[in-house]
Amino acid sequence: MDLASLVRDVPDFPEPGIVFKDITPVLGDPVAFNTLIAALAEKYEDQRISKVAGIEARGFTLAAPVARTLEAGFVPLRKPGKLPWQTMRQNYSLEYGTDALEMHIDAVEPGERVLIVDDVIATGGTAFAAVELLRRAQAEVVGVVVFIELGFLNGKATLEGVPFHALVRFD
Ligand code: AMP
């Protein structure tokens, strides 16, 4: 199934110059959604993943069903101030300025094998922050898997040795 053809390009969203990769047509198609989740999980079926971490907010829509598929738990990584319990925070650089991700301090045990899932990798700053949070919690980051890689931004270069996989690459 050609999932890439269902991704909708939205020019100048959320700001001028950005071509937003809108995955909602994939999420809304029962066969495409199921195919996407199975494809994201496939490489990790024999990897003894105990937690799947998803990045707010579109990452949640993919990471939670991947967690179910792998019979793993789900860990939300969220923007500052959203998680109710004690958190650890990782700042990261954006093209202009900085942002941060937070995770509950008890979300993972040391040594747990964790897979990070997101919809899109662009500059890689967000995925890098996710990897850093999990490493600081002494989890073993088994990989980062995304639906879409914006290859021209070379975001995977920020991931420094963490196995990375994208289902679709746009150049
Ligand atoms: P980055 O940190 O630059 O790799 O940006 C990745 C995050 O921003 C992901 O969580 C994506 O959901 C979102 N994102 C960045 N660029 C795009 C884009 N062109 N289309 C859709 N989402 C994007």
Image (cartoon, rainbow, N blue to C red):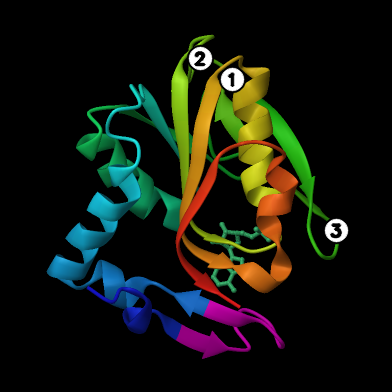
Give yes or no for contact between labels 3 and 2 (Cβ–Cβ under 8 Å). no
Foreground residue, 167 or 53?
167
Q: Secondary structure at mark 2?
A: loop
Q: Secondary structure at mark 3?
A: loop
Q: Residues within 10 Å of mark 1 (few under 14, many from 20)?
A: few
Q: Amino acid at mark 1?
A: Gln
Pointer 3: what residue? 97
Quarter of the rendering occupied by the C terminus: bottom right
Q: Is residue 96 above or below residue 156?
A: below
Foreground residue, 142 or 122?
142
Q: CA distance from mark 3 to mark 2?
A: 29 Å
Q: Is residue 130 left or right of residue 73?
A: right
Q: Residue 8: give x, y in percent of width and height.
A: 41, 84
The mark that comes first in sequence, 2 or 1, is 1
Foreground residue, 88 or 25?
25
Q: Residue 90: give x, y in percent of width and height.
A: 72, 34
**Residue at the image point whose x is 68% and y is 31% from the top:** 132
Q: Residues within 10 Å of mark 2 (few under 14, many from 20)?
A: few
Q: Amino acid at mark 2?
A: Asp
Q: CA distance from mark 1 to mark 3?
A: 25 Å
Q: Is residue 3 visible?
A: yes
Give yes or no for contact between labels 2 and 1 (Cβ–Cβ under 8 Å). yes
Q: Is residue 43 left or right of residue 18?
A: left
The mark that comes first in sequence, 1 or 3, is 1
The span picked out in magenta is: 9-20
Pointer 2: what residue? 106
Pointer 1: what residue? 86
Q: Secondary structure at mark 1?
A: loop
Task: Assess whether residue 18 is covered by the magenta stretch.
Answer: yes
- Tell me where residue 141 sits by quadrant: top right
Task: Assess whether residue 119 is covered by the magenta stretch.
Answer: no
